[in-house]
Image (cartoon, rainbow, N blue to C red):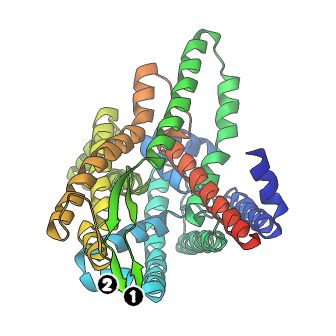
Amino acid sequence: MIDKIIQIFKVKEIRNKIFFILALLVVFRLIANIPIPGVDQAQLKNFFEGNQLFGLINLFSGGGLSSISIVMLGVGPYITSSIIMQLLTMIFPRLEQIYKEEGEAGRQKFNQWTRYATVPLAAMQTFGMVSLLRSQGILGQLSSFDMATILTVAVAGTIFLMWLGELITEKKIGNGISMIIFAGIVAGLPASLSQIIATWDPTKAVTYIFLLALVVLAIGAIVTVTEGQRNIPVSYAKRIRGNKMYGGSSTHLPLRVNQAGVIPIIFAMSIMLFPGMIANFLASASNPTVASIAVWIGNVFQNQWFYGILYFILVVAFTYFYTAVVFDPNKISQSLQKQGGYIPGIRPGGTTTEYLYRIINRITLSGALFLGAIAVLPFIVQGAFNIQAISIGGTGLLIVVSVVIETIKQIEGQLVMRDYEGF
């Protein structure tokens, strides 16, 4: 590992890319600590400590929401826009054709539409969030000009972070949006550790040791599942063209245990946000019936058991959904058949499609249950030990480990490419 680190910093191009990305992340953390005026910080802290739902929103905003900074929404609207566009590909075949069959030009067009959709989503989410914070007494009375200013600044902040994310992605050392979320999560660790040290209770030493062991086991499980795959053997028939023979080789088709990554958790969280946000917004409505229903819904979503169970079910369901979006057994079967490939013991065509469907459904079940367990891990820890889990949580841990693994793979890929060039 030390030799690889030395090798990374010996290659000037990779070294410059890493320093460039670190500089962009520093810029992100600086602007994430510039608050908008008129915020009651004490009330804001109490609000986030007592609300698990908005703690998750803050996680995906990169920590900007907890300080109501000028990037208070983080990359959340862009992620929501991406989810909506992915869902639309299931409804409109033409959109799916543009994304999957028109090559790089089609993907660029698709990404451009995603960026356009981010702007109105950011404006709506900012308005809803500001209205909610006003109703909680965190923000004072705002004039129309103040509201327009906050909307403009927050939308511009989201677009700026989206641009930073794309600059990072262009360097081909990790996904930019994921790295921004990663930076926001890691930035909260020093405060969490200092809080644990400041409130250290010797009588709970065994509990802390057990929690540390649980974190280590969770990291090991995340790495195992993230890297885990089932290899389906594929053979290619021999073909003779002229005086040359092609094919006759054997390879494998890798099916990952977790095809969907962290996307199902983001999907589930996005769905879970709306009822709670709308309920909090309508709780102070002038109509008593609407207000009472909103309060009831808000209380239901504050119930840890209800929230945890529904969150788990949604994560499992969205894991299957997103796997169906990114993995099409029918297209893989057709591609194998065109290239003269086949799975030993399985007939090409429809039989191969059914076989791949059966295998991917079994694999996805274990991946979906694992993602669901990681998502509700903070609720389990909090319920079992009657203590607040550290801010990183199960979802944050999954994101951090996944981003680190992906970044290391991309750096190693660039090192291997340079080894081949040198050879």
Query: Which of the two residues, 416 or 383, is positioned nearer the viewer here?
Result: 416
Label 1 sits on a secondary structure element that is loop
**17 up-or-down from 269: above or below:** below
Query: Which of the two residues, 111 or 192, is positioned nearer the viewer here?
Result: 111
In the drawing, does residue 421 fall left or right of residue 221?
Answer: right
In the drawing, does residue 303 fall left or right of residue 399?
Answer: left
Q: Are marks 2 and 1 in contact (CB under 8 Å)?
A: yes
- Neighbour tally class for label 2: few under 14, some 14-19, many 20 plus, Cα within 10 Å: few
Residue at left offset 49%, top offset 55%: 134
Query: Which of the two residues, 269 or 402, is positioned nearer the viewer here?
Result: 402
Residue at left offset 51%, top offset 55%: 60
**354 up-or-down from 236: above or below:** above
Identify residue type, mark 2: Gln
Identify residue type, mark 1: Glu
Pinpoint residue 365: horizontal percent, then vertical percent.
27, 46
Q: Quadrant of residue 384?
A: top left
Pinpoint residue 84: horizontal percent, then vertical percent.
35, 70
**Residue 47 appears anywhere in the view:** no
Q: Earlier in the sequence, mark 2 or mark 1?
A: 2
Which residue does the numbered mark 1 point to in the structure image?
102
**389 up-or-down from 241: above or below:** above
Number of numbered tags placed on the structure image:
2
Which residue does the numbered mark 2 point to in the structure image?
97
